[in-house]
Image: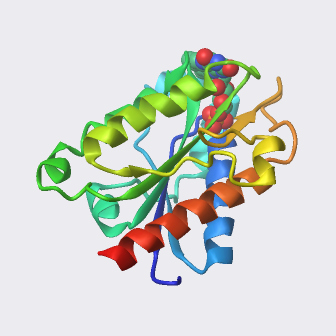
Amino acid sequence: MGNVKLAIVYYSSTGTNYKLAQMAAEGAQQFGAEAKILKVQELAPESVIASNPAWKAHVDATANIPVVTNDDIVWADAIMFSTPTRFGNMASQMKQFLDTTGGIWFQGKTVNKAVSAMTSAQNEHGGQEATILSLYTSMFHWGAIVVSPGYTDNSIYAAGGNPYGTSATVDQDGNIKGDVKGAVIHQTKRLLSVADMIKKGQ
Ligand SMILES: Cc1cc2nc3c(=O)[nH]c(=O)nc-3n(C[C@H](O)[C@H](O)[C@H](O)COP(=O)(O)O)c2cc1C
């Protein structure tokens, strides 16, 4: 299984989706896959980031995380996305990255990538599924194979579990409610096992 390559592509303002990305990397390690954690390019004006201490601290703390490129997508057999819910949609930074993939899409290089998505939101019913679906809509155009968790494991019934993709809820202080790691690890392993099947099938 060790030859499956996973790109974990995330956006995070205050660290939640970075934590989800790190949990996915742990799942990849358990599976024996090669994984890269990659952030999408920040786009918010520096003045806006500076006005929010938690945002500024997170940007500084993750300065060394590489920014994802189209080459990373071409390299990967599987891609796990993680984005905050923003007004029931993916963060614009994530959408901007997807909108830079037209060239590799045109060359057929996004076809048959195994993909899955996670999100976080403040409210239990704050648009998590709409966010994940918005990302999957772009994936249908990529010709990617969307690997949703479905109800394939008991972790779907635990904290963060969601058949569309792990959905963490954050409290007022920005901490994740409950232990969502089981859901993330299951989703990652399922994504990698389908990527492995696709790779072997090719
Ligand atoms: C502009 C904006 C829009 C948001 N929209 C929603 C929303 O629609 N539903 C919700 O529950 N939380 C919403 N939130 C809260 C974020 O989802 C929450 O802060 C995020 O999940 C934290 O992720 P991060 O720490 O990785 O940045 C919003 C936050 C911002 C800044």
Q: Residue at x 87, y 41 (%)?
A: 178
Is 184 rendered above or below residue 162? below
Which is nearer the eye, 91 or 183? 183
Q: Residue at x 68, y 53 (%)?
A: 152
Q: How many marks?
A: 0
Q: Residue at x 28, y 63 (%)?
A: 74
**Is residue 49 at all visible to an observer of this figure?**
no
Quadrant holding the C terminus: bottom left
Farthest residue toward the top? 87
Is 91 rendered above or below residue 178? above
Query: Looking at the rendering, which quadrant does residue 139 occupy?
Result: top left
- Of the four image quadrants, the one with ligand 1 is top right
Which is nearer the eye, 63 or 145? 145
Query: Looking at the rendering, which quadrant does residue 84 occupy?
Result: top right
- Measuring from the top left, give residue 75's x and y in whole percent: 32, 69
Which is nearer the eye, 187 or 26? 187
Q: Is residue 142 left or right of residue 137?
A: left
Colouring method of the image: rainbow
Is 22 rendered above or below residue 129? below
**Is residue 201 at all visible to an observer of this figure?**
yes
Farthest residue toward the right? 178
Which is nearer the eye, 185 or 9? 185
Query: Looking at the rendering, which quadrant does residue 69 occupy?
Result: bottom left
- Measuring from the top left, give residue 99's x and y in whole percent: 27, 36
- Measuring from the top left, give residue 82's x and y in whole percent: 55, 44
Is 83 rendered above or below residue 185? above
Farthest residue toward the bottom? 2
Q: Residue at x 78, y 56 (%)?
A: 182
Q: Is residue 9 left or right of residue 104?
A: right
